[in-house]
Amino acid sequence: MSHTTVFPAMLQPTTANLRPRSDEQQEKMRQIAQDFEATYLAQMLKPMFENLSTEAPFGGGAGEEMWRGFLVEAMAKETARAGGVGLVDTVMAHMLKAQEGLV
């Protein structure tokens, strides 16, 4: 047996040091996953508003261009908060796997 031999048991993650996560930790992870989903949604919504025609008297100008990004971000955050498109659970599952060394 050489010093470079790897046994399959060595490749399995150890569960000895894993502790159940508190409700506070779970909620923090859910919030991070929800923020990620909101960022993703904002990037997907952004092109929808880039060529949007705005006309007087209620639209146009430098002010609208400046505030449009904030509107897109607010829409994305609200969409994610209201249930989003289903990324939160998937992102949380991958976060948990990464913490446990399974990814």
Image (cartoon, rainbow, N blue to C red):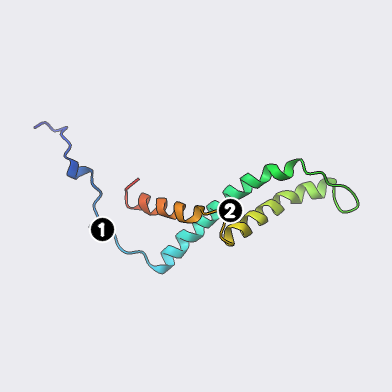
- In the image, residue 101 sits, relative to residue 80, either above or below, namely above
Q: Amino acid at mark 2?
A: Ala
Q: Amino acid at mark 1?
A: Asn
Q: Crowding near pointer 1: few (<14 within 10 Å), some, many (20+)?
A: few
- Which residue: 18% across, 41% down? 8
Tell which residue pokes out farthest to the right in this image. Answer: 57
- In the image, residue 45 sits, relative to residue 32, either above or below, namely above
**What is the spatial separation of the Cα atoms under label 2 and label 1, in whole angstroms?**
33 Å
Question: Which tag is nearer the camera, tag 2 or tag 1?
Answer: 2
| Element type where label 2 sits in the image | helix
Q: Crowding near pointer 2: few (<14 within 10 Å), some, many (20+)?
A: many
Provide residue 92's location: percent of width, then percent of height: 44, 55
Q: Which mark is residue 38?
A: 2
Q: Which residue is mark 1?
A: 17
Provide residue 88's location: percent of width, then percent of height: 49, 55
- Front residue of this view, candidates 16 and 44: 44
- Front residue of this view, candidates 11 and 82: 82
Provide residue 32's location: percent of width, then percent of height: 50, 56
Quarter of the image where one finds residue 82? bottom right
Quadrant of the snapshot with the C terminus: top left
| Element type where label 1 sits in the image | loop
Provide residue 26's location: percent of width, then percent of height: 42, 63
Tell which residue pokes out farthest to the bottom in this image. Answer: 23
- Which residue: 55% across, 52% down? 37
Quadrant of the snapshot with the N terminus: top left
